[in-house]
């Protein structure tokens, strides 16, 4: 039987999933992205080179790995082509990439609407990436969207495009935005079809065939993070999909019985980009120090990320919701040098201690973190390759996180390079 592993972000995105999926992609036969789109920003570093991915799965660097952009994604074909061109320039030319014929397609008007809707919110911005992700998912659920497979059937594509423009052009006009000419879009997308056409297939069948084979390793790569989940995140300051392991079956088109082994990627502290309450947020010099040391600037938008302490309320919540088997504790080296490190164990709100995040951000905004203080360490840990080599205070911090979140730490990352990874869990060593 195949082995499968789901890697998900467990905070507000940017936890370092790119590095972890790349780490496993070296050994995986298949890497599948199952939600989100080019709003994700994965940075992968190896052999001294830095690569940035938005919608393409992290297995793209290994010529033997089959990469799948599955039906749960919203795929912008223009951006896929641009990403591939960037990779070509960096010498990545030998790869296998397939895109689901059922994936929703991000069209040029989606990013126009994304920007306009944000502007209409006045001061209460969501702080989206403006890649058109929300409008593309909205059209999917309104059943007016186009899908990637439509590109392979020109007459049907023309019909769908005509219907979409009949609805979108008047809306664009009302917002004072440029409208789209049917023929121009049609011609552009027929050119696009020539490039990505050979990649389009029924990826549900492809993934299933891998899962059924002996000795195949299949990696499901989540994008964003659980607190940006449309259902369980800090709504409305969320993305438009479900980054949890729970969305793997629907988003990849497979049976839920294949979902096992969930690795929750968590920073050793917390960050978030965009707006929304963030109970453990730091505003002093320590935030600046962590931001600079961790290069905490958005890979898609370049925005400085907000920084806070590790939030065990969030971690317990996401572990429970997504069935996280282990944490991959990321950017652990960034904490070196701090005198004291805090962990949030609960929220104090209206005289009560909450053990799980409240459902509204109005209540969350009133939550004050209940913090415990841990000793910091001064040593440089970027060269550590086993748990035993870590300073005692660093080990105590890891043990405390395991205890409070009731979830073991299976991996620790002590630097951006593939080699700077400590794998603790035996199951993960075998994948
Ligand atoms: P959207 O996904 O572009 O609609 O943005 C909605 C919210 O999700 C915003 O706060 C974004 O900053 C955030 N977001 C989307 N993708 C990512 C990601 O990959 N990392 C971190 N935040 C993200």
Image (spheres, grey):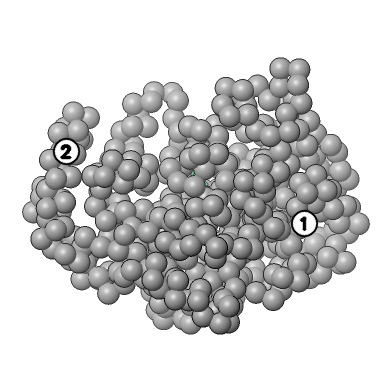
Quadrant occupied by the N terminus = bottom right
Please give left or right for residue 272 compared with residue 279 in the image: left
- For residue 167, the mark is 2
Q: Residue at the location (21% across, 60% down)?
A: 150
Tag 1–tag 2 contact (CB < 8 Å) = no
Q: Residue at the location (55% across, 39% down)?
A: 232
Q: Residues within 10 Å of mark 1 (few under 14, many from 20)?
A: some
Please give left or right for residue 387 compared with residue 274 in the image: right
Q: Residue at the location (33% across, 32% down)?
A: 117
Q: Is residue 239 above or below residue 399?
A: above
Task: Say what secondary structure mark 2 lies in.
Answer: helix
Quadrant occupied by the C terminus = bottom right
| Residue 175 image position (x, y, % from top left) | 22, 30
| Residue 337 image position (x, y, % from top left) | 81, 50
CA gap between label 1 and label 2 equals 50 Å
Please give left or right for residue 117 compared with residue 327 in the image: left
Residue at the limit of the structure toward the right, as seen here: 392
| Residue 292 image position (x, y, % from top left) | 65, 48
Residue 113 appears anywhere in the view: yes
Give the residue pinned by disc 1: 408
Residue at the limit of the structure toward the left, as seen here: 183
Q: Is residue 218 above or below residue 54?
A: below
Q: Residues within 10 Å of mark 2 (few under 14, many from 20)?
A: few
In the foreground, 281 or 294: 281
Q: Residue at the location (83% across, 48% down)?
A: 403
Q: Is residue 125 above or below residue 300?
A: above
Question: Disc 1 or 2, which lies upstream in sequence?
Answer: 2
């Amino acid at each position: 039987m195949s082995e499968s592993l789901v890697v998900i972000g467990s905070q507000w995105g940017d936890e370092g999933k790119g590095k972890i999926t790349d780490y496993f992609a070296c050994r995986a036969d298949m890497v599948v992205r199952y939600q989100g789109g080019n709003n994700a920003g994965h940075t992968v570093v190896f052999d001294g080179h830095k690569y940035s991915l938005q919608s393409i799965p992290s297995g793209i660097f290994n010529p033997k790995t089959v990469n799948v952009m599955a039906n749960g994604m919203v795929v912008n074909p223009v951006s896929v082509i641009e990403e591939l061109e960037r990779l070509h320039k960096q010498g990545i030319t030998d790869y296998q990439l397939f895109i689901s014929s059922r994936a929703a397609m991000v069209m040029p008007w989606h990013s126009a609407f994304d920007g306009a809707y944000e502007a209409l919110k006045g001061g209460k911005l969501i702080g989206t990436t403006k890649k058109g992700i929300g409008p593309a998912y909205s059209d999917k659920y309104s059943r007016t969207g186009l899908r990637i497979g439509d590109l392979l059937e020109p007459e049907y594509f023309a019909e769908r495009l005509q219907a979409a423009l009949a609805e979108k052009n008047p809306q664009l006009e009302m917002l004072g935005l440029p409208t789209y000419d049917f023929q121009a879009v049609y011609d552009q997308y027929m050119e696009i079809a020539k490039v990505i056409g050979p990649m389009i297939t029924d990826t549900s069948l492809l993934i299933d065939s891998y899962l059924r084979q002996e000795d195949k390793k299949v990696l499901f790569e989540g994008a964003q993070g659980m607190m940006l989940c449309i259902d369980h995140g800090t709504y409305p300051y969320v993305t438009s999909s479900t980054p949890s392991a729970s969305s793997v079956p629907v988003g990849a088109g497979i049976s839920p019985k294949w979902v096992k082994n969930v690795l929750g990627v968590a920073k050793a502290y917390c960050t978030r980009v965009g707006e929304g309450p963030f109970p453990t947020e730091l505003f002093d010099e320590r935030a600046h120090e962590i931001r600079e040391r961790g290069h905490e600037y958005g890979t898609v938008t370049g925005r400085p990320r907000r920084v806070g302490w590790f939030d065990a309320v969030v971690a317990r919540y996401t572990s429970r919701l997504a069935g996280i088997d282990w944490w991959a504790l990321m950017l652990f080296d960034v904490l070196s040098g701090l005198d004291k490190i805090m962990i949030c164990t609960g929220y104090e709100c209206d005289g009560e201690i909450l053990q799980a995040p409240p459902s509204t951000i109005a209540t969350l905004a009133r939550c004050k973190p209940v913090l415990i203080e841990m000793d910091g360490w001064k040593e440089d840990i970027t060269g550590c390759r086993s748990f035993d080599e870590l300073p005692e205070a660093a080990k105590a911090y890891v043990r405390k996180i395991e205890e409070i979140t009731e979830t073991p730490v299976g991996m620790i990352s002590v630097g951006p390079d593939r080699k700077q990874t400590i794998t603790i869990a035996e199951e993960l060593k075998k994948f």
